[in-house]
Image: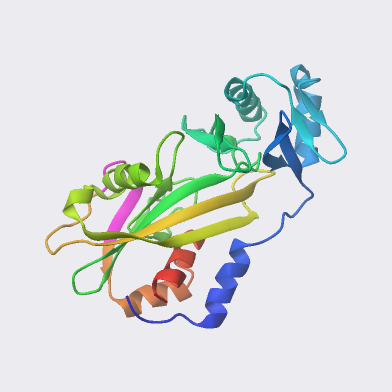
Amino acid sequence: MSGLLPREWVAGVQARLHRPPERPRVPLLWRGEPIGSVEPELVRDVLRRAPSWQGRWMLRAKAAELGNGALTPLMAELAATLRDLGLSHVWRDEQLAVCDARGAELGTVERAVVRPLGVATRAVHLVGLSPDGRHWVQQRAFSKANDPGLWDTLMGGMVPSRQSVEEALARETWEEAGLRMGQLRDVARGGQVVRRSPTPDGPHGYVVEAIDWYRCTVPEGVVPANQDGEVERFELLASAELQARLLASGFTLEASAIYAQALAA
């Protein structure tokens, strides 16, 4: 891949990736372990509207502490409460890992509440090239809850609980692009993008996410075909057209950051 994007544009993408919370947040603790962060006002709202959490979710001066029960059932109950109070994102019935500061999985939580709870997540993306150096990109379905209609890398998705990045890469590549890893050539890890910034997707949200991205060559005659209804269409773009769409804010923030790295490689 070749071609450089303007430094000012890259700096703007980085600034959007790394923004402090718009409102104060405190660590979310379970058995003394930080597992996320929350706005104190969210905790107060839950305690006021769902009294069953009194004594099980304690707001201290510098932290919000969950009770000492098993983490996964506790998080499931909290997720259901946030959903019932209109404080969650779109419900996915998808469990993501809740980890300690060292990355060890302590339990799981419904994807819909990871942002209001500030739980760190992982995602994986695939940058696809044709043999002549053009770029396979997807347009996100207009029915998507996040970034509908924007352009994205060939594939992008979350890494669920108890699945490795490589396993998620293979699964998402099939679901989003209808491609098996054995059909692709020169699959290699390209790098990582880290995002820490507020999210407009629901109240009280903050994104903490590490995105591992890979690159590959899609052989001549192999064409992506969406399997899960989450992609509007695929296009094969020359580098100049890819860069033009990036500069015109046609891509998601995550994809923009990935291409900023990939095009500079």
> Measuring 42% from the left and 76% from the top, which residue is drawn there?
264
Residue lying at 78% horizontally and 19% vertically, measured from the top left: 51
In this picture, residue 245 sits left or right of residue 76: left
* Quadrant hosting residue 189: bottom left
Q: Percent position (x, y) of residue 94?
A: 46, 32
Position above or below: 101 against 247: above
Position of 167 relative to 110 (above/below): below
For this rendering, which residue is in front, 132 or 163? 163
Q: Which one is in front, 193 or 188?
A: 188
Compare residues 38 and 101 and report the one nearer the observer. 101
Q: Residue at x 72, y 41 (%)?
A: 38
Q: Is residue 164 visible?
A: yes
In the picture, measured across the screen, residue 84 lies left or right of residue 24, that is left
**Residue in view at x 43 percent, y 59 percent:** 150
Q: Quadrant of the N terminus?
A: bottom left
* Relative to 193, 187 lies left or right: left
Span colored in magenta: 226-234
Q: Is residue 196 left or right of residue 27?
A: left
Q: Identify the image quadrant of residue 42.
A: top right
Whether the magenta-drawn stretch holds residue 38 is answered as no
